[in-house]
Image: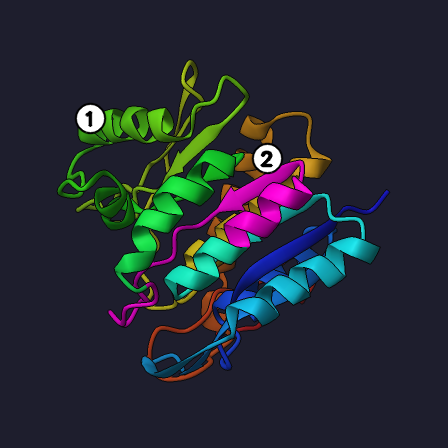
Amino acid sequence: MIPSTLTIAGVDPSGGAGVLADVKAMSALGAYANGVIAALTAQNTKGVTGILPVDPAFVALQIDTLFDDVRIDAVKLGMLGQQKVTEVVAERLAHWKPKYLVLDPVMVAKSGNLLLEKPAVNALREQLLPQSTMITPNLPEAGVLLEARPAETLKEMYGVAEKLHRMIDDGKERWVFLKGGHLPGDDCPDLLFNGDQMVEMPALRIQTKNTHGTGCTLSAALAALLPQTPNAVEAAKLAKQYLFKAIARSHEMQIGSGHGPVHHFHHWWPPVNS
């Protein structure tokens, strides 16, 4: 059966991040994508010019109406924006209990604009992390969650992954996917940790400015792949491979003049000579 997945996130009109990017990634990886809008933004590849919150009660209504009718195999959480929205999303997901919940703790846009108000961090930390099957913070986001400076080396990342896992461990199979893209140098390894097994996933940095929505794309890919793969390690490796290729072929898109999007449909669309 084709998995039915859900993204709960904000909308990026340029399509490189948020719900639109999530739908592309989920679709490219063989899942049927549903979407709940948690926030509206005015943005392009150069930055965010405005954010319009969605009423928390309407976010709850979207979630309840969808779950009441549609089978949801996995949920990905992205930009939630406000504390009240974060709290209502946590409340409704605790009610509906999806099998897989991938949390991308979106806090800052690639342009540097804040996407999560500071009072919402505690709600995310206390109410959503404990429900998550997998969390996918980058190093600055992990620092915020732990109230510590971001890791600067792979060795420090090991300690961060262990501390983050203690925040989500409830005796079940829970994973931390710690992204190392902010490390200095040409290597950008990621770590996958479940409290027992630490999997290092190495990668070389691709020199490109087209990195808009990489975090959204990875977490959406994980939500699409977790119901289709035998275990979380396989899903993580496939998601990382998908994103790597999407970045490598991003130059074929030529969207905008800032941080362009990745190529979500690189497997389906023929290569374009650059």
Can residue 200 be seen here?
yes
**Which of these two is toward me, 81 or 232?**
81
Res. 272 image quadrant: bottom right
Res. 126 image quadrant: top left
Q: Residues within 10 Å of mark 1 (few under 14, many from 20)?
A: few
Residue placed at 53% from the left, 55% from the top? 89
Q: Earlier in the sequence, mark 2 or mark 1?
A: 1
Image: magenta residue range: 89-116
Classify 133 as above or below 125: above
Can residue 271 be seen here?
no
Classify 190 as above or below 89: above
Quickly name the residue at label 2: 235
Residue 35 appears at what percent x and percent y? 65, 64
Classify 54 as above or below 19: below
Residue 240 appears at what percent x and percent y? 49, 43
State yes or no: discs 2 and 1 in contact (Cβ < 8 Å). Answer: no
* Residue 71 falls within the magenta-colored stretch: no
Secondary structure beneath dot 1 equals helix
Secondary structure beneath dot 2 equals helix
Residue type, label 2:
Ala
Residue placed at 60% from the left, 71% from the top? 58
Q: Residue furthest top?
A: 196
Residue 109 appears at what percent x and percent y? 32, 67
Q: CA distance from mark 2 to mark 1?
A: 24 Å
* Residue 92 falls within the magenta-colored stretch: yes
**Which of these two is toward me, 211 or 187?**
211
Residue placed at 39% from the left, 51% from the top? 105
Quadrant position of the N terminus in the picture:
top right
Residue type, label 1:
Lys
Quickly name the residue at label 1: 155
